[in-house]
Image (cartoon, helix red, strand yellow):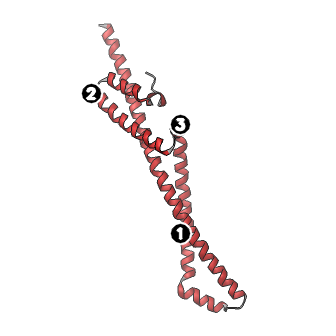
């Protein structure tokens, strides 16, 4: 009777370790998926900011050119003032500049969170190109689903075999 009891505890220990591994795998998979989504968003946002910056620089150059024309007495400052007020160019430019500044602040906050997440996941993504990271995420999701099925069936042998065959066990600290 004693060996059966000891075997029961050993199975519970195995089960707990496999559940912990599956949970870790799931959590890391969610974080990795979030990081991959953020990569695309960061690139798109950066591109949008670059385009806005170019447009604002062009507008600034045009305004400098207008001021230069006033200094050379090509047009009067009153005419320039009327031109700017009538077109609403100056107010629009100020508004766009304020929006751009706020967008840069939000982008930097988002980028900081992205960098923190990337740093946290560095052991997983280090020395992997983006396609390898996507493949890793897919493998993690498949293994997590397969492990979940095996654990629900209480088939510890199948669960352990899945982990040992996947190669992810060592990467996530599974020692059995």
Query: Taking 60 as reference, is 163 above or below it?
Result: above
* Rendered image: mark on residue 99: 1
Frontmost residue, 125 versus 18: 125
Residue at the right extreme of this rendering: 72
> At which x and y percent is residue 174?
45, 26
Q: Residue at x 47, y 41 (%)?
A: 132
* Rendered image: mark on residue 153: 2
Residue at the left extreme of this rendering: 153
* Rendered image: mark on residue 17: none
Q: Label 3: which residue?
A: 123
Could you tell me how far apart the alpha carbons at marks 3 and 2 are, in whole angstroms? Answer: 32 Å
Q: Earlier in the sequence, mark 3 or mark 2?
A: 3
Secondary structure of the residue carrying numbered label 1: helix
Secondary structure of the residue carrying numbered label 2: loop
Q: Residue at x 29, y 32 (%)?
A: 149
> At which x and y percent is residue 160?
37, 24
Q: Residue at x 46, y 48 (%)?
A: 36
Q: Residue at x 71, y 91 (%)?
A: 73
> At which x and y percent is residue 139?
40, 37
Residue 22, image quadrant? top left
In the picture provided, is 37 more to the left or to the right than 78? left
- The number of discs equals 3
């Amino acid at each position: 009777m004693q060996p059966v009891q000891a075997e029961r505890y050993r199975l519970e220990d195995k089960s707990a370790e496999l559940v912990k591994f599956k949970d870790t795998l799931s959590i890391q998979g969610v974080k990795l998926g979030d990081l991959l989504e953020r990569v695309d968003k960061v690139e798109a946002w950066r591109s949008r900011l670059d385009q806005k910056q170019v447009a604002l620089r062009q507008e600034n150059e045009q305004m400098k050119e207008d001021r230069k024309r006033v200094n050379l007495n090509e047009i009067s400052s009153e005419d320039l003032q009327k031109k700017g007020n009538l077109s609403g160019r100056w107010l629009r430019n100020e508004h766009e500049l304020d929006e751009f500044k706020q967008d840069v602040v939000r982008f930097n906050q988002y980028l900081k969170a992205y960098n923190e997440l990337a740093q946290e996941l560095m052991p997983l993504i280090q020395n992997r190109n983006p396609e390898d990271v996507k493949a890793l995420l897919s493998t993690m999701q498949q293994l997590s689903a397969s492990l979940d099925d095996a654990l629900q069936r209480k088939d510890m042998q199948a669960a352990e075999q899945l982990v040992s065959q996947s190669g992810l066990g060592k990467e996530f600290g599974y020692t059995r």
